[in-house]
Amino acid sequence: MSNTKSTARAALSETKSTPSLKAAKPDKPAKPLLVVEPEPAADDGNDGIDQRIGESARALRKAAGLGLKELAERTGLSTGMISQIERGLSTPSLRSLRLLSVALDVPISHFFEEPKEVRPPSFVVRASERRLLRLSPSGVVKHLISPDGPAVIEMYELELAPGGSSGDHFHRHYGEKAGYVLEGQLQLMLGDEVHVLEQGDAFRFPSVLPHMFSNPSTVLARIIWINASAQG
């Protein structure tokens, strides 16, 4: 009898110690990876306009014999901003274009003109081919008499009406200026010095020297004006 009870207890103990087996849950299917494709760059419709504006602004600045610093002073824009515009790296606002157009004496539409057909370099300018660059309200008419295109040295013929002048403030920038009085008088102010030049007189000075000029006489003055602009 005791053996029977012992056997029953052992069987019961074995039953309790054996863990119950539960049905294994099936693995959940892995979620698919969400791959986000980069969107193609939006076409802003610029069509190279920034580059065209920059090249035009740089060419006009060079033609005027202005450095970045002087153009910045005339416009109130920073030299960094002007440099970015000239390299086509920044889209100028309408206000910036207006400031540049006033400082460079061109209409705003000039910056959007299509580039002209590239021509072989010319080394001669005929009298009939002279290009009028500026008709200033201050009585200065400016003709480009050297071959057109980027250059370190550019020559102009200035016509100064009686009382005509370069403006009411001094200019200064990098490079050199020189000239020759063809007829009439030229009053040249270089810093604190004032020089009155007559027909046949000539001049040369570094452009960093504050300068301005005028015609103090009652007759038209004609001057050959040479800009030797600094590179950069």
Image: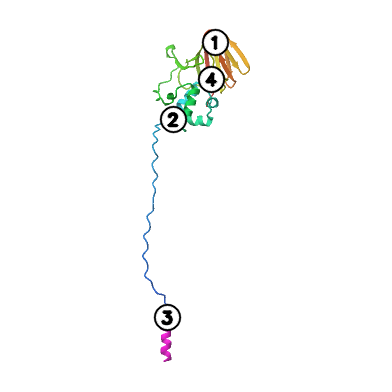
Residue at point 53%, 20% (across, down): 228
Callout 1 amino acid: Val
**Is residue 6 located in the magenta-colored stretch of the structure?**
yes
In the rendering, which numbered label is found on residue 51? 2
Where residue 145 sits in the image (x, y, percent)? 47, 15
| Label 1 – label 4 distance at C-alpha | 18 Å
Q: Residue furthest right?
A: 192
**Is residue 144 located in the magenta-colored stretch of the structure?**
no
| Label 3 – label 4 distance at C-alpha | 109 Å
Q: Residue furthest bottom?
A: 1
Where residue 93 sits in the image (x, y, percent)? 46, 31
In the image, is residue 48 above or below residue 19? above
Residue at point 51%, 19% (across, down): 153
In the rendering, which numbered label is found on residue 14? 3
Instruction: Judge by depth and name the residue closer to the eye, 147 or 215.
Output: 215
Which residue is label 4 attached to? 228
Residue at point 52%, 31% (across, down): 80
The main secondary structure of the magenta stretch is: helix
Callout 3 amino acid: Glu
**Magenta span covers which residues?**
1-16
Q: Secondary structure at mark 1?
A: strand
Q: Is residue 124 visible to us here?
A: no
Instruction: Judge by depth and name the residue closer to the eye, 169 or 208.
Output: 169
Dot 2 alpha-carbon crowd within 10 angstroms: few under 14, some 14 to 19, many 20 or more:
some
Which residue is label 1 attached to? 181
Comes first in the chain, label 1 or label 4: 1
Quarter of the rendering containing residue 53: top left
Q: Secondary structure at mark 3?
A: helix
Comes first in the chain, label 3 or label 4: 3
Callout 2 amino acid: Gln
Where residue 26 sits in the image (x, y, percent)? 36, 65
| Residue 15 horizontal side relative to residue 165, left or right | left
